[in-house]
Image: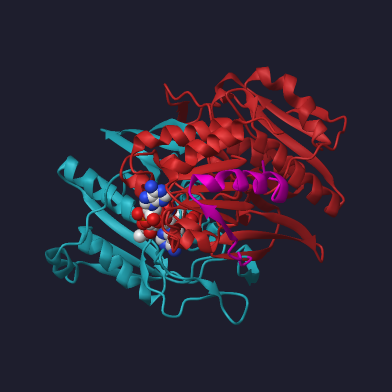
């Protein structure tokens, strides 16, 4: 018996969410008294990375390498994960609630005829059964759900678990990868999208802007602040500015955007509509800058500055950059 | 092009949702229900594809109670040709619902099945990929751009920090993300016509749940914090608090 954790890679590199998934998996495996198996699918170059999976708690690593796995291959991934889960007698199978995990986990659950809890923030064992906590209604409520039947399928919300090292000498075994791995669904990366900042859902610090910033040109101030805060900072936006075409939809935070829970969230010129709050109210620390002292965002902000964001931002950038005395 | 769109009735995103007295469900008293916003993109895309093809049909299917007829009528008023109500309760997880939908879809003729990427009540993000798996069809989820050229589908899907291009041959499935299109509003004429369009009812029975809700909790209440000050002059104090008090930078 075992717990399986799907270790996600993209472009031949493990993603940070892979280690968070392993950490959640390790806790669960310990609670159930079973081993933790990492499943790693990707191009052959990834063989060098298997040691890292042992460092984060995997007792065993099952690898499936193919050149066709440089990109996500939904049908083959489903096949391999489902087979691994069956053969290992998995009591639980964990994925990151990432773009790939949210596509793969439901497919694997359907294949295994098992229940899936999406976007879980916590998973534990109570009275011998796996129980998970997950947000619903865009985080307006949280639900504690228990699994009926096995395996328990889970996708773990980014940043809900902090990756913790738990070193082991993981045994590496190869999964038999079939002939036609490409499948009917062909996936390739879009061209010309150089990514330099973490995605808003995965960032440690989110710097968000709303209509109050006045124009898309003013985003250079948000970019400068994010740069000053370090490589873990990502950009977010309200729906108003996404709808206006100022920012890409991928940055939208809220009920119809992304639900984020970073340790630090900045809201510049965002009023704090209920749909926006739903997407960020579980952030660790919220800072709001708004001209209007009555703006609803101040009702949930830990720290507020009443004022013009365009005046506050340059000063804030300067202050963050200044070496500490 | 024969297109089936799966739609769900959900509480309006404006509604205040809190746990009900039983602690096992949410209080929906006084809540306004709407067609799931992501499903509006799916319906719009279906109508556009049919219009571009110059022929074909668009049907909508939902698994739900009697009250879901209202949601189906909204889709009919937008221009959908026919609607099917699978009478029964959706499951807590996505699989039971997907099984009921897959069963209903299997018996019908279609080239493309469209979904919203997510229902904004359960936020499961599961049903579309599960239906694809159950029907053995190719599928792209979280799609922001779609091209259908004869039988060839090219979909752009959102991933962290960018996009992926997904290609497959029809028949297949697509789950719509915001950005795909601008959904039309039902016109007065559409609303009148909707009343005369076919609405089939099938006793589907309740979907099997493989998860059970043990407890519903309200999120921790966030107490209002402090106003550090006004304007740029408050910045040094803010930075000090972020460093020394909250210890987040
Ligand atoms: C179905 C549905 C789903 C939705 N989903 C989302 C969602 O996912 N995410 C989301 O964000 N919204 C969502 N919304 C929209 C939401 O209701 C609000 O309209 C939106 O969040 C407002 O964006 P905003 O705060 O940028 O703009 P506004 O509400 O216009 O607020 C601008 C704020 O900036 C302040 N301001 C103006 N000038 C300055 C200045 N110079 N310096 C500082 N402050 C200034 C103003 O005081 C004001 O508070 C949704 C709505 C619906 C109906
Ligand atoms: N009860 C239902 N009836 C019809 N379609 C549904 C139902 N539940 C979910 N769907 C479809 O599946 C999508 C994703 O839902 P979910 O997996 O619940 O987040 C929705 O946007 C709908 O298109």
| Chain B display color | cyan
Magenta span contains residue A287: no
The answer to whether residue B153 is left or right of residue A285 is left
Which coloring applies here? Answer: by chain
From the viewer's side, name the closer residue of B216 and A284: A284
Residue B227 in the image, given as x and y percentages of width and height:
55, 58
Residue B99 seen in the current view: no
As displayed, is residue A108 above or below residue A278?
above
Residue A49 in the image, given as x and y percentages of width and height:
73, 23
The quadrant holding residue A146 is bottom right
The answer to whether residue A100 is left or right of residue A26 is left
As displayed, is residue B130 above or below residue A58?
below
Residue found at x 60% / y 35%: A320
The quadrant holding residue B188 is bottom left
Residue B85 in the image, given as x and y percentages of width and height:
35, 68
Residue found at x 46% / y 26%: A188
From the viewer's side, name the closer residue of A322 and A60: A322
Magenta span contains residue B239: yes
The answer to whether residue B223 is left or right of residue B65 is right
Q: Residue furthest left?
A: B189
Please tell me in which quarter of the rendered image ligand 2 is found.
Answer: bottom left
For the image, the number of numbered tags is: 0
Residue B55 seen in the current view: yes
Q: Spot the red chain and give its letter.
A: A
What segment is highlighted magenta in the picture? Answer: B220-249
Residue found at x 44% / y 42%: A311
Quadrant in which the C terminus of chain A is drawn: top right
Q: Residue furthest front?
A: B233
Residue B210 in the image, given as x and y percentages of width and height:
62, 62
């Amino acid at each position: 018996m075992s717990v399986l954790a799907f270790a996600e890679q993209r472009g031949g590199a493990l993603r940070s969410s892979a280690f968070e998934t392993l950490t959640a998996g390790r806790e669960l495996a310990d609670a159930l008294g079973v081993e933790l198996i990492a499943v790693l699918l990707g191009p052959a170059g990834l063989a060098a990375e298997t040691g890292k999976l042992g460092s984060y708690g995997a007792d065993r690593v099952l690898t499936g390498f193919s050149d066709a796995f440089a990109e996500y291959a939904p049908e083959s991934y489903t096949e391999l994960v489902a087979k691994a889960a069956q053969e290992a007698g998995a009591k639980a199978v964990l994925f990151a609630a990432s773009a790939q995990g949210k596509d793969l986990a439901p497919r694997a659950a359907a294949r295994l005829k098992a229940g899936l809890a999406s976007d879980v923030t916590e998973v534990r064992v109570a009275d011998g059964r796996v129980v998970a906590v997950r947000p619903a209604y865009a985080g307006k409520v949280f639900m504690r759900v228990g699994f009926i039947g096995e395996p328990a399928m889970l996708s773990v919300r980014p940043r809900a678990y902090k990756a913790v090292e738990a070193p082991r000498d993981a045994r590496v075994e190869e999964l038999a990868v079939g002939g036609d791995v490409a499948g009917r669904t062909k996936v390739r990366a879009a061209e010309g999208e150089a990514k330099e900042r973490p995605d808003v859902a995965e960032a440690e610090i989110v710097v968000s802007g709303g209509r109050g910033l006045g124009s898309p040109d003013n985003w250079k101030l948000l970019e400068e602040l994010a740069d000053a805060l370090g490589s873990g900072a990502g950009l977010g936006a309200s729906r108003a500015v996404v709808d206006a075409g100022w920012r890409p939809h991928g940055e939208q935070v809220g009920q119809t955007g992304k639900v984020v829970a970073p340790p630090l969230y900045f809201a510049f010129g965002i009023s704090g509509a209920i749909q926006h709050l739903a997407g960020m109210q579980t952030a660790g620390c919220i800072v709001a800058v708004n001209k209007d002292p009555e703006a609803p965002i101040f009702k949930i902000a830990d720290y507020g500055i009443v004022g013009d964001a365009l005046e506050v931002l340059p000063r804030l950038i300067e202050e963050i950059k200044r070496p500490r005395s | 092009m024969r297109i089936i769109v799966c739609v769900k009735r959900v509480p309006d995103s404006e509604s205040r949702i809190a746990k009900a007295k039983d602690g096992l469900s949410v209080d929906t008293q006084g809540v306004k229900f709407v067609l799931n916003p992501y499903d509006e993109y799916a319906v719009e895309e279906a109508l556009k594809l049919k219009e571009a093809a110059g022929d074909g049909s668009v049907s909508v299917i939902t698994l739900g109670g009697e009250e879901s007829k209202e949601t189906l009528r909204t889709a009919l008023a937008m221009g959908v040709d026919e609607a099917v109500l699978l009478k029964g309760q959706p499951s807590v997880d996505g699989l039971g619902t997907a099984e009921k939908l897959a069963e209903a879809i299997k018996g019908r003729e279609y080239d493309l099945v469209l979904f919203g990427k997510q229902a904004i009540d359960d936020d499961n993000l599961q049903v579309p990929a599960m239906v694809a798996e159950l029907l053995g069809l190719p599928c792209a989820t979280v799609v922001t751009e779609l091209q259908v050229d004869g039988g060839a589908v090219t979909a752009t899907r959102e991933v962290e920090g960018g996009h992926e291009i997904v290609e497959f041959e029809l028949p297949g499935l697509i789950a719509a993300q915001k950005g795909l299109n601008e959904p039309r509003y039902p016109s007065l004429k559409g609303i009148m016509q909707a009343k005369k369009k076919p609405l089939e009812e099938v006793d589907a029975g309740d979907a099997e749940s493989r998860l059970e809700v043990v407890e519903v909790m309200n999120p921790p209440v966030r107490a209002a914090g402090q106003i550090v000050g006004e304007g740029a002059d408050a910045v040094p104090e803010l930075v000090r608090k972020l460093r020394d008090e909250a210890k987040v930078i």
